[in-house]
Amino acid sequence: MKAKPIIYSVLAVILIAAGIYTLSNNKKKNQAETAIVSQKNEFISVNVTQAKYEHITNDYSSNGTFAPYQELSFPSEISGRIVRVLVDEGSYVRVGQTVATIKKDQLEVDNSNANATYQNAVVDNQRYENAFKTGGVTKQQVDNSRLQVKNARAQLQQANLRIGDTNVRASINGIINKRLIEPGSVVSPGTVMFEIVNVSRLKLKVNVNESQVASMKVGDEINVKASVYPDTPFKGKISFIAPLADASLNFPVEIEISNSNENKLRAGMYGTAVFNAKDSGTAHAMLVLPKEAFVGGVSSNEVFVVNKDNTVKLTKVVVGRIFGSQIEILGGLKDGQTVVTTGQINLIDGAKIKIVK
């Protein structure tokens, strides 16, 4: 009976010893694996570049959208029913050309009545004038007669204008972009009938900053590129420079471009204005870095500089002008210093790196 408790105790001791041994082995194994991982992650792989002096021109560009030189939503001036529409979408029209006619039967009747009223007023006034000379009427009666002639003449002129307005005439040169009426349509004053655009000339609207606008003046010749015609050069002239900056502290500028006979350019296309620097036609050597070198974007003014022992130092720099993907560096770096361009998200000040490129 006493042998069984002794056996159980021995077995328990053996099991406890086996567990301790297993835990010890597992701990050593985990420590070995952790050491291997730590060794693998000791260096962070990055790409780098060197800060260096490059000759970059002071030319700069600004993107915008081509707009028509003139654009008009053409409204009706009178009420009536459309009798004829003489143009279609895409038709070219000139100033004064009749583009539609409005039914004028009732207006002609009104005009005839107004003319008769005017003629009667003229005859009556002549009678009063003659009678006044002999003392047959008073001065007040003559004045009233003259006023009636004046009012009747004004009503006749108004009736004549309404008759003329039944022939709807274009008020600008251009192309019918939209036709919003058909024969039988009923219009009233203000009803838009056509949309006319003049693209014989176009306006490229761009924004420039204060340092750029200071050297511009109206009439300056500007090189212009169109995104759909990358190999075709266009010439334009500055026609407007805003006297007041917008909310982003940029100044709206309009550049007028003569369009070709084939109307290659169309309103709404994207364009680029290339402004030539005023100070010279040559390039200037300046210390530059690519945009990719900046931690969190150019506005941070921070880059990781590589030390001789392959560690990095987070460095504050002074940024100058932006030339495409190249950023001018005014301070904080020297020519030839190595700077990280990719992998910054994994870096901290003093981190060890492995240069891939």
Image: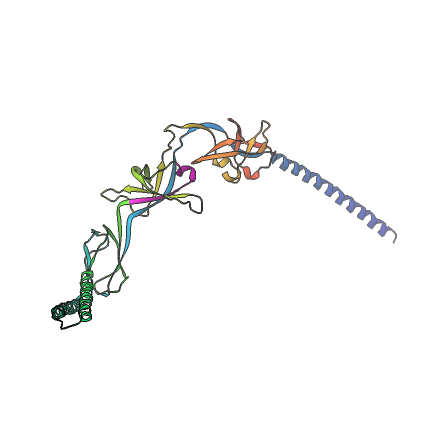
Left or right? Give the position of 122 relative to 290.
left
Q: Quadrant of residue 231?
A: top left
The answer to whether residue 357 is seen in the rendering is no
Left or right? Give the position of 303 relative to 24.
left
Left or right? Give the position of 345 relative to 60.
right
Report the front residue among 252 and 298. 252
- State the quadrant of the N terminus: bottom right
Q: Position of residue 151 (x, y in %)?
A: 20, 66
Report the front residue among 65 and 254. 254
Residue ID at (49%, 32%): 329
Residue furthest out toward the bottom: 136
The answer to whether residue 133 is seen in the rendering is yes
Q: Quadrant of residue 149?
A: bottom left
Report the front residue among 252 and 217. 217
Q: Position of residue 290 (x, y in %)?
A: 47, 34
Left or right? Give the position of 138 relative to 33.
left
Residue ID at (42%, 39%): 210
Q: Quadrant of residue 46?
A: top right
Q: Point out the stretch of residues depicted in magenta.
A: 202-214
Q: Position of residue 98 (x, y in %)?
A: 18, 56
Q: Position of residue 214 (x, y in %)?
A: 40, 37
- Is 205 within the magenta? yes
- Is 210 within the magenta? yes
Coloring basis for residues: rainbow
Residue furthest out toward the front: 135
Count of marks overlaid on the render: 0
